[in-house]
Image (cartoon, rainbow, N blue to C red):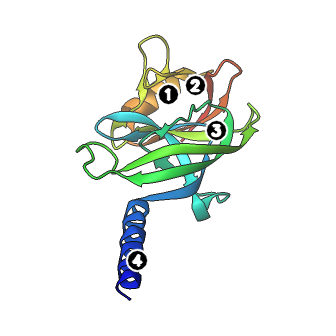
């Protein structure tokens, strides 16, 4: 009888330990949009646009301010992923409290270059348009402002919120089509 009780206690301890380890980790489905948007973290940043679990396939996209370990994003493609999410016990003050790790790329869908998309060019007075060498989005993505360069300059200078509608060019530039 004592051996059976000891065996049950041991099994109980082992099961409770494994459950504790797994409670900080889960696997989710995630969809990554074909373009990045801007956001404000510690400073201005480019963010992925994502859908998670039940939101996958809807029209609702959220900014994603961290990275996915093992995932190499390429603009112009929509990715369906399986991702492990782990809680970080002591996250940095300016970082996420979760670690995301790619488990599987389930599918990749090429998006036609003529597909239009909106990017926030200015939020609450914070401009994301840089002009170090032509027009760029945070000095990372080249912007062809087409015939709208003067309007882009004036709008970004005079408004607190500016949204640009873009299409992708073959060389990973984006072309401004309209300003809101």
Q: What residue appears at the point 45 percent right and 33 percent down from the top-left corner?
A: 155
Decide which of tag 3 and tag 4 comes sooner along the chain: 4
Instruction: State how far apart marks 1 and 3 are (Cα).
Output: 23 Å
Above or below: residue 146 compared with residue 96: above
Mark 2 lies on residue: 148
Q: Are marks 2 and 1 in contact (CB under 8 Å)?
A: yes
Task: Label 2: state its secondary structure.
Answer: loop
Pointer 3 local density, CA inside 10 Å: few below 14, some 14–19, many at least 20: many
Q: What residue appears at the point 34 percent right and 44 percent down from the top-left corner?
A: 124
Q: Within the image, what quadrant is residue 10 found in?
A: bottom left
In this view, the residue in front, 143 or 59, is 59
Q: Within the image, what quadrant is residue 52 found in?
A: bottom right
Q: Which mark is residue 7?
A: 4
Task: Label 4: state its secondary structure.
Answer: helix
Instruction: State how far apart marks 1 and 4 are (Cα).
Output: 73 Å
Mark 3 lies on residue: 34
């Amino acid at each position: 009888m004592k051996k059976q009780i000891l065996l049950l206690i041991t099994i109980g301890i082992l099961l409770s330990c494994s459950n504790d380890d797994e409670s900080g980790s889960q696997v989710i489905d995630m969809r990554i949009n074909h373009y990045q948007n801007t956001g404000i973290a510690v400073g201005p940043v480019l963010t992925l646009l994502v859908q998670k679990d039940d939101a996958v396939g809807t029209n609702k996209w959220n900014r994603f301010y961290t990275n996915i370990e093992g995932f190499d994003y390429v603009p112009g493609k929509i990715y369906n992923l399986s991702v492990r999410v782990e809680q970080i016990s002591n996250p940095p003050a300016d970082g996420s409290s979760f670690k995301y790790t790619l488990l599987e790329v389930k599918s990749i869908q090429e998006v036609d270059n003529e597909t239009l998309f909106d990017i926030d060019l200015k939020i609450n007075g914070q401009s994301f348009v840089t002009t170090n060498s032509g027009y760029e989005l945070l000095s990372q993505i080249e912007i062809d402002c087409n015939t709208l360069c003067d309007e882009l300059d004036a709008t970004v200078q005079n408004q607190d919120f500016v949204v640009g509608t873009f299409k992708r060019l073959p060389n990973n530039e984006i072309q401004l089509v309209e300003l809101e």
